[in-house]
Amino acid sequence: MRGDLVERARNGDREAFGQLAAGEVDRLLVIARLVMRDADHADDAVQEALIRCWRQLPNLRDLDRFDAWLYRILVRTIADEAKRYRRSVRNIRVIDVEPSIDDSFQVIADRELIERGFDRLSIDQRTVVVLRHFVGLPLIEVATALGIPAGTAKSRYHYAMSALRAALEADARPTAGRKVVA
Amino acid sequence: MNPPVDLEQVVTAWLGDQASASGSDRVLAAALGRAATVGQERRRPTWLQLPTGVRARYVALAVLIVGLGLVFVGGAMLAASGLVRQPAPGGLLYQRDGDIVLVSRDGTDPIVVADGAPPSDVDGRWYALESWAPDGRHFVYHEIQSNQPRVVTHIADATGRSIASFEIEPATTGATPAPTPGPGSERVDRALKSKWHTWWSPDSTLLAVFPWSAEVRIFGLDGGLRATLPLPPGYGMWREFGLRWAPDGKSVFVVITADGGSDSAREVWQLALDGAPPERLAPGHALERWDVEVSPDGRRVAFSGLNYPSLEGPIYMASVDGSDPQPIAATSHPGEVSSFPLWSPDGTRLAYMVTLSYGGLNYQLRVVDLRTGTDRLVATAWDDGSINRAWSADGQRLLVRAYDVEPATHEAPSPRVMRKDTALWSIGVDDGDVRLIMENVDAFATATRPR
């Protein structure tokens, strides 16, 4: 069904593309917001990515690779969009999420620290972490989706996780009085 | 001390909490609205579908290309006759848009060794640079077909001519089953799509290859398999992996992690080419270990250590057997993490990075002299996370691939308009001289002891 939609959209069927886009937009939006940490810019990036998808679909040769191809378009669009606001990327939060009722203080504290660490990462690093841990792609496929060597994906991932680990382990310091949101 | 945190689990949970697609209807409507006003980029029509005028232009272009080809062939003949300069052995290699390019160490005389498709071509064949042999007489690169599970590894001579090639099938004998599902569940067949990591022996005659399996394979310059070195059972298939040849070239040190163990519990094992059983050299200790680098003489290791309970993580040094780990005091920078040590060719200095707490990925590039304990800021770099650095063969300069580099006069990066692509920079270790060598570089390699 989806493969059929991709094929029809590739052949210029706008209605099929509309259905295809409707099925993808949530996923793209979540990824873009997680990576960019800014809802407005993420919305713009996804909008642009969908348009690029439409324009470039005729050049997609292997329908089975649509997902990787679309990820790559999204990631490149995010990169382009991010360059426009690179200097203001810090100190931006996308979504305030209320902690779950059963979250312990420690879990909440960990997530706060993770958020701080995540905000410090580069766009490229966030992309690798999101594709790895949110989308669930193996690093090899992350590399394929990004069009980068697997070694580069690994080092980006390694560096990002090192930074996040460091952020978490800041909590291990005996600094009394660190605030925990309850 | 808090109990160990499963970082991957925490990150996954946090990302899940953060996920929101609210307002997607609005984004979709806007996108479809705009898409309705634009057409698709169709593939080029076939030859016979082209208008006559266009076909004539293509014919003219073909004539031009043939002419240029004749000029190129003539140039090559001149080069072969020695009338035109060739890159010296151990010249600079770089990867750009799927191509491998060889230039002399001064950046001149470029030769396109392998002409690949740009990364945006999802079906194209492209080339990934690996490394020079230490003597600068050979180098290795990979040929990757994006849509096929096939990687061909080429060994080229100093002029860029491929003299041997080989493919590696994934090992299955003795392979540790991949943990599934979840993090680290890459399958062997998927690993085929990746390029292998390679390391040259000190005498530049052997190539160690880690094909993301349970073994290290040793190849000769002719592409023939010389030895297969199994990793100890239960180690290393799906984690970070590092390798360094022993100075005598008779064994390799591998930095591996036990499957199912902590991500940071790195161990150093020695694998002998003569088939002797693997020997564990570094017993675990209280320090977290990252980025373990064996020294050029094979006697010491340097690594990043996150020292509990404080965050400050200096670079540590220990014997290669893991004993007597000592922080290098000069590399401790309060509140920041020192990481990715890189030995100078003579083993007297360590280059390392201090990650800065700014947006994006910025780091100080610092060098500590192990003889005097002197630490100095060399430059500040804006990186993309790939951490591609190398010492020059004479140990006087550091080569760095980064978006931008600022000289050591700046303790922190200043706001600026970033360049679009990463470039190759050369930085004087002692004088802080920063030079832009080449723009738009995806990877680079240098020879450590060119002859």
Image: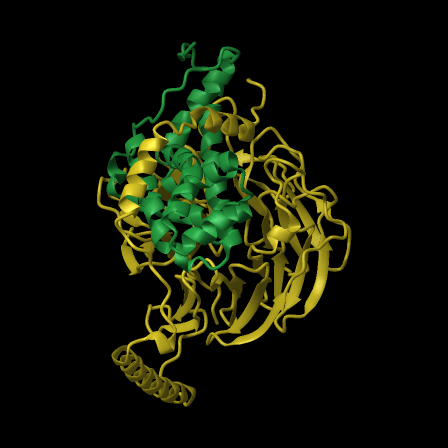
Q: Is residue B77 left or right of residue B190?
A: left
Q: Position of residue B339 (x, y in %)?
A: 46, 39
Which residue is more in the foreground, B308 or A95? A95
Quarter-of-image position of residue B60: bottom left
Q: Position of residue B380 (x, y in %)?
A: 31, 44
Q: Colour of chain B?
A: yellow
Q: Position of residue B285 (x, y in %)?
A: 63, 31
Which residue is more in the foreground, A125 or B231? A125
Residue B134 shows in the view = yes
Residue B314 shows in the view = no
- Tell me the colour scheme of the image: by chain
At x 27%, y 77%, the residue is B54
Q: Position of residue A112 (x, y in %)?
A: 42, 21
Which residue is more in the foreground, B224 or B437? B224
At x 61%, y 35%, the residue is B182
Name the quarter where the C terminus of chain A is drawn. Answer: top left
Q: Colour of chain A?
A: green
Quarter-of-image position of residue A91: top left
Query: Relative to A171, is A18 above or below?
Result: below
At x 40%, y 72%, the residue is B112
Which residue is more in the foreground, B225 or B201? B225
What is the tally of numbered marks visible in this picture?
0
At x 41%, y 75%, the residue is B88
